[in-house]
Amino acid sequence: MPPSDAVPAPRGAKDPYLLASLHRGLEVLDCFAERDSWTLSDLATHLNQNKATVFRVLHTLEGFGYLAKDAATGRYALGLRLQALGAAAMRNEQLRWQALPPLQDLAESTGETVHVGILHEGVVVTVQIVDGTHAVRMHSAVGKRSPAHASALGKALMAYLPDAEVDGIVARHGLVRFTANTITTPQALRERLHRIRLDGYALDEEEIEDGLRCIAAPITDRSGRPTAAVAISAPASRMDPARIAELIPRVKASAARISRMLGSPSVAAA
């Protein structure tokens, strides 16, 4: 991060925190919003840069799959990786805002904090949240990252992954203990995920933080594949077995409502 005494650079002055090589790469990518494809020569002329510099940028972006080169014509176009990132961004933006009314309804009817999360590289990332109305409530924030094995959101999503993907997440992140209730063995995690698939919801029973309980259910995409989850969280003092039993169908109904809005069949049908 910039030092606390840093001041904005005067207009036209060089930004000391800007990565020149990354800046050049992004300038090149921006050009593909103007044309579907470019030759090296045309792009260098358009950017007023020498061919050697532009070639290194193109070669790097091609190597990472962000650009693709036509061997016959030598022209560069957007690659599948960049298209996949754009599609993912659109899906997440659609999810965030289409999920908002159901989340607001759930938060208003229960008084508890409601949030939506996705699984990214084996970690849960919160993408939307609506605070509850109780004076004492659980606070979160968009962008918050949580361990998948210890959160209701994470388990609700991992339950529908192939075993190999779950094993990969465990190998990468481990099964860190946060409380006395945290799942810390692969066998226990597999058994819990199997139960979640049967029940259609996941619980966090003070597994990530003492005094916090959560209920989550998966949200499915157009293919019926779970790609996000909705959860309700509250202090354990308000989440006794009777209250949990009352909230489970509400959370599942909200997840199904969001799924339908996204054009998805039910999880059962998937």
Image (tube, rainbow, N blue to C red):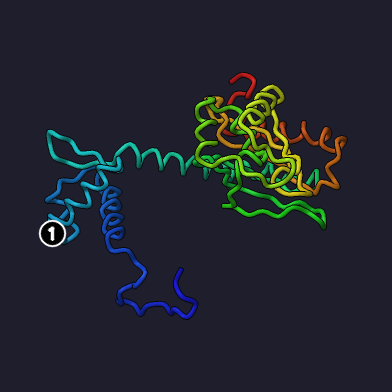
Residue at image point 79% right, 53% down: 133
Q: Quadrant of residue 198?
A: top right
Q: Is residue 105 shown above or below 1?
A: above
Is residue 118 at all visible to an observer of this figure?
Answer: yes
**Residue nearer the viewer, 9 or 163:** 163
**Residue occupying the point 32% across, 63% down:** 19
- Residue drawn at x 68%, y 29% as measured from the top left: 192
Asked whether residue 106 appears in the rendered view, the answer is no
List x then y, in percent, for residue 125: 57, 46
Residue closest to the eye, 127 or 197: 197
Give the amino acid at mark 1. Answer: Asn
Position of residue 157 relative to residue 61, above or below, is above
Is residue 27 found left or right of 176 in the rendered image? left
Residue 185, quarter of picture: top right
Q: Which residue is mark 1?
A: 50
Q: Secondary structure at mark 1?
A: loop
x and y percentages locating residue 112 in the rendered image:
77, 47
Identify which residue, 218 or 100, lies in the foreground: 218
* Residue 130 locus on image (x, y percent): 69, 50
Q: Position of residue 119 (x, y in %)?
A: 55, 39
Q: Residues within 10 Å of mark 1 (few under 14, many from 20)?
A: few
Question: Is residue 100 rendered to the left or right of residue 27?
Answer: right
Report the label total: 1
**The C terminus, quarter of image:** top right
Horizontal arrangement in the rendering, residue 136 relative to residue 65 (left or right): right
